[in-house]
Image: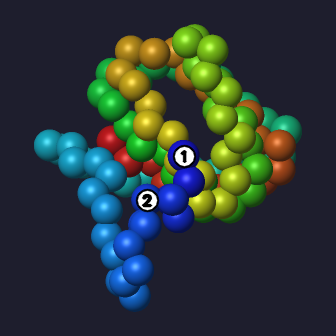
Amino acid sequence: MILKNLHIENKPVQTQLLFEPKDAKVISLQIAKGETLKEHVSKIPALLVCVSGNAVYTDEKGTVINLISGVYVMIEENIKHAVKAIEESNFLLMK
């Protein structure tokens, strides 16, 4: 999903609620070029936003998302997933 596509009104300032957890954490995540955040399961839903770089998100449901700046993915709870960095990549992980 692309953040820019959420803002469709002709207004100079727009907001869009993306994620509303009860007990929130926002984590800065960096993955070096060619490295992988190995396959794992999140016990709660999460939102992963690519700030910079180029990476690929995959999950056990067959989802494949190319993560570049401004692209995000909603990570479902209890679904195995992984992220492989094509180049050094930086993310914000909210859960």
- Amino acid of disc 2: Leu
Does 84 sit above or below residue 22?
above
Residue at point 56%, 54% (across, down):
2
Q: Give x and y (percent) for residue 61.
A: 55, 12
Q: Local crowd at mark 2 within 10 Å, few (<14), some, or many (≥20)?
A: few
- Amino acid of disc 1: Met
Residue 25 makes an appearance in the image = no
Which SS class for mark 2? helix
Q: Residue lying furthest left in this view?
A: 22
Q: Which mark is residue 6?
A: 2
From the viewer's perspective, tell me whether residue 8 is left or right of residue 56: left
The quadrant in which residue 78 appears is top left
Q: Which residue is mark 1?
A: 1
From the viewer's perspective, tell me whether residue 54 is left or right of residue 15: right
Does 50 sit above or below residue 75?
below
Which SS class for mark 1? loop
The numbered mark, 2 or 1, whose residue comes first in the sequence reads: 1
The quadrant in which residue 51 appears is bottom right
Does 4 sit above or below residue 95?
below
From the viewer's perspective, tell me whether residue 15 is left or right of residue 40: left
Does 62 sit above or below residue 17?
above
Is residue 51 or residue 35 the one in the foreground?
Answer: 51
Is residue 50 or residue 65 the one in the foreground?
Answer: 65
Residue at point 76%, 50% (across, down):
54
- Mark 2 vs mark 1, CA separation in Å: 9 Å
Q: Give x and y (percent) for residue 70.
A: 59, 60
Instruction: Point out the image quarter for the C terminus.
Output: top left
